[in-house]
Image (spheres, rainbow, N blue to C red):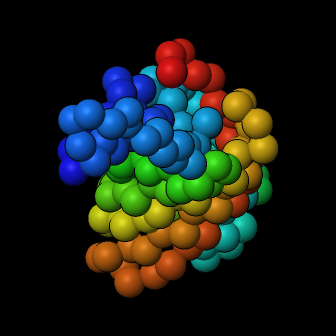
């Protein structure tokens, strides 16, 4: 038995002997998993308080680089994080992206003399997993639980992601 894959990795052929025609087996392929795409999203992060969340990223051959910005109402607290992950297509509509990253929480500190200063409040490493349900080739619903290794806390980011595929 020999196993061969076409270049697009959507069809596998199995031949049982040299004198027989190959049997074609169609695999379920996620039509929304592209080799090269940009994406942007908006949502909410539930951490110590509820934050408005903006994200943008780039995915090249499954390798995903993502930047997230979150802010509280009134812009008193912000968080910034960078994540690196690997995007995996699951079935026809789901994308799963395990991620590792680094996050910093920033905010205003008020002083007794009436002054204030904006600075980094804390920073830590995070482990996350982005789960997307693709509605069409450009729009997905995303849920992204993450865990802070250093601070031992959990956060959940949920929202809509707009994907701009550049190639297959």
Q: Position of residue 64 (x, y in %)?
A: 39, 40
Q: Is residue 63 visible?
A: no
Q: Nearer the viewer, residue 96 or 79?
A: 96
Task: Determine whether, in the image, residue 91 is placed left or right of residue 66.
Answer: right
7 is higher (above) or lower (below) than 62: above
Quarter-of-image position of residue 137: top right
Residue placed at 47% from the left, 63% from the top?
A: 129
Q: Nearer the viewer, residue 9 or 38?
A: 9
Task: Determine whether, in the image, residue 75 is placed left or right of residue 6.
Answer: right
Task: Determine whether, in the image, residue 57 is placed left or right of residue 3.
Answer: right
Task: Determine whether, in the image, residue 74 is placed left or right of residue 81.
Answer: right
Residue placed at 36% from the left, 65% from the top?
A: 126
Total residue callouts: 0
Q: Nearer the viewer, residue 1 or 12?
A: 1
Q: Nearer the viewer, residue 30 or 119?
A: 30
Q: Position of residue 61 (x, y in %)?
A: 36, 31
Residue placed at 34% from the left, 24% from the top?
A: 7
Q: Is residue 100 visible?
A: yes
Which residue occupies the extreme top position in the image? 166
Q: Position of residue 23 (x, y in %)?
A: 43, 41
Q: Position of residue 67 (x, y in %)?
A: 47, 41
Residue placed at 37% from the left, 67% from the top?
A: 127
Quarter-of-image position of residue 125: bottom left
Which residue occupies the extreme bottom position in the image? 152
């Amino acid at each position: 038995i020999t196993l061969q894959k076409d270049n697009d990795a959507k069809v596998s052929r199995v031949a049982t002997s040299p004198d027989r025609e190959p049997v074609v087996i169609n695999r379920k392929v996620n039509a929304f998993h592209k080799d090269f795409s940009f994406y942007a999203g908006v949502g909410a992060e539930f951490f110590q308080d509820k934050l408005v969340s903006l994200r943008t990223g780039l995915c090249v051959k499954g390798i995903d680089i993502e930047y997230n910005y979150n802010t509280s109402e009134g812009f008193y607290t912000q968080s910034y994080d960078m994540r690196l992950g690997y995007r995996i297509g699951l079935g026809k509509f789901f994308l799963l992206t395990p991620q590792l990253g680094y996050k910093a929480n920033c905010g205003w500190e008020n002083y007794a003399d009436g002054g204030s200063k904006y600075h980094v409040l804390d920073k830590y490493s995070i482990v996350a997993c982005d789960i997307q349900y693709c509605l069409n080739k450009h729009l997905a619903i995303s849920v992204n639980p993450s865990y802070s290794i250093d601070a031992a806390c959990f956060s959940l980011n949920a929202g809509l992601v707009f994907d701009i595929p550049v190639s297959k």
